[in-house]
Structure formats: C-alpha cells, structure tokens
Image (spheres, rainbow, N blue to C red):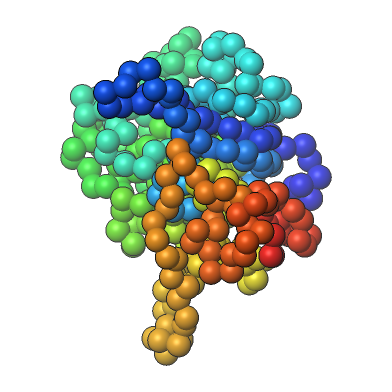
Amino acid sequence: MREAAPPILSVRDLQVHFRIKAGGAWPWSPARILKAVDGISFDIHAGETLGVVGESGCGKSTLARAVLNLIPATAGSIAWMGREMTTASSDTWQAARADIQMIFQDPLASLDPRMTIAQIIAEPLRTHRPAMAEVEVMQRVKAMMGRVGLMPQQINRYPHEFSGGQCQRIGIARALILEPKLIICDEPVSALDVSIQAQIINLLKELQKSMGLALIFIAHDLAVVKHISDRILVMYLGHEMEVAHKKALYAAPRHPYTQALLSAIPIPDPALERKKVIQLLQGDLPSPMSPPSGCVFRTRCPLAIARCAEEVPALRRLSDQTDAACLLA
C-alpha cells in the first residue's frame, strides 16, 4: 500500500505569521500578528494527490509557498525525503526544488511575455542542469510539449499568442521538464472555462499516472478536487477543519464547514437540485489578525455552543479515514 512507504513530504504544525505594522498617527503602537497558516500537518506519499480546499483568504496559497520556502515558516517542521528542511541552507533548497515544482493560478501572468515557449519550458533545465547540451535541451522541450498537448511548431511563439488553457499547458510543461517527484498546483484551473478545467485536470491525472507524480492540488471548489484527489484537507482561517479520504469526505462529511461547502456543489439533476438544502454560512470570513476565540469557525457555525468559544478543538481521529477539528463531530 502507498501509505506503508515513508512519505516524500511530511509537514508538522506548520505556522506562517506576518508582523503587520500599526498604521495611523501612533508609530509606537505595537505591530499586530496576522496568522495566515496556524498549525497545519499532513503527509504526501509518492503518486498521491492531496486536495487542499477552503474559501479565499484561508491560507491555501501561503501554505503552498511555505512548503517551497518561497516565504519563511514561523514555526513547525517540513521534511522532504526524510530530511528536515526548515533549517536547510539556500543551496539545499535549490537542489530540492528540482524535485518540487509549482503550477500557478493565472496561466498567462506566470509566463514571461518576453520569452518564447522554448525558452520558458527550457528555463528549469538551464537553471538546474547547466551542463546539458543545447541539442538535448531542445529535444526534451519538444518531447514535453507533445506530452502536454502542444504542437512542436509552436515552439518559437510567445505566451500572448496562446489561449488560457494552452498557457496552462505551457506552465505544466515547465513544471514537468525536470521530472519532479512533487508538483504543487495552486488553483491551476480557477481562471479557466469549465470545459478547459476538465481538460487540464484529465491531463494532470494522465501525467501523474505515467510519471508517478505526487500532487498538492489547491482549489476553493470541492467539486473540482473530487476528480483528482485521494485525500482532502479542508482549511478555514489558517486551520485544518477536516482531513479525510475522498470517498469518506463526500459520503459523510463530519465538520460543519465541510458540510456547508459540499452543500454548495451544484447537482446535474434539476429535480435533485431543487430539493437540495443549501447550508448558507452567515457573515464574512473573520480577519486573521483578530480571529475568534476557541474554534475559529464558531462565529459562522450553525451548531456552535458556549464551549466552542472557550476551547480550541484539536484535529482528532473520528474513523479510519477521517480526522476533524470539531468538539461536536
């Protein structure tokens, strides 16, 4: 079984806090702390996909960047292939990034408009394998273009000459050219049409199967991650609300926040859609600079009791396939 092997990535109690300088007329006022990620733990095994979902502003992208050390972690542990990385040198991280790549949310904005497609896809090879001959570099670029559904004759075109879906394929080719072990997908389909979303997700699944990739797939839509994830981590205000295998989460969600997110997924059958009860969340997402006491979800939770304001619920095992951070689950 996949879980029997050691994880390639292990994250424990990861925290990312930012000091926000006080504004106004009092420069001596103390800085405030914004807790973007506050105690996230998970493992990723080879060939596995972990979906990370939650509303905008819940810390998903900050988590992704902290895993790659693009922003420093405030506390916690990140272990890659069994090696502790939170105290690793920049050279160690540079070597590790050959095996950990990222696909960004905006397919066009993530590509340099001054570079051709050949230069964009080849850039990781020139960075991590500078001794590779130019002929071999171009051979690998053309081969990878074919794998992601791009034509070799497009190799000297620029990003503005491609559609959004094609630009995302270019981003995927760039991420895959080094044959990494893990790819972090930061909402890679949110800027695309629904039909193109399905094409990109199917492409990622095919490439994962053929290359043995592990994926962290970030999205705000549970309907999207359902088709690609093995396990799903639900985040709210920087905290883990629920971590479960896909079938268990969609069949019997345990946390009220997960239940609300699932109730918002449209059902293709009009008769069932009309009968569905949508669990609307009241109010807005609280500020991460002044989160509620106790359970951070309690101000919007329909089941909240007085105890929820006093205790911070720990993530606890509810079944073989589900963990949830709820006092009432």
Residue 92 percent coordinates (x, y): 60, 14
Residue 313 % position (x, y):
68, 52
Image location of residue 197, percent across then percent down: 37, 56
Image coordinates for residue 143, horizontal then vertical, percent: 43, 35
Which residue is situated farthest in the bottom direction here?
271
Q: Nearer the viewer, residue 173 or 241?
A: 241
With respect to residue 252, does 31 lie above or below?
above
Q: Is residue 104 visible?
A: yes
Q: Residue at coordinates 54% horizontally, 56% vertically from top-left?
A: 297
Residue at image position (55%, 51%) is 296
The quadrant of the rendering that contains the C terminus is bottom right
Q: Which residue is outermost to the right?
A: 4
Answer left or right for 281 relative to 256: left
| Nearer-the-camera pick, 195 or 291 | 291
Tell me what residue is drawn at x 62 percent, y 21 percent.
86
Residue 209 seen in render: no
When the figure is inspected, residue 119 is found, relative to residue 311, above or below; the finding is: above
Total labels drawn: 0
Q: Identify the residue at horizontal 48%, vertical 9% (top origin).
A: 131
Residue 317's image quarter? bottom right
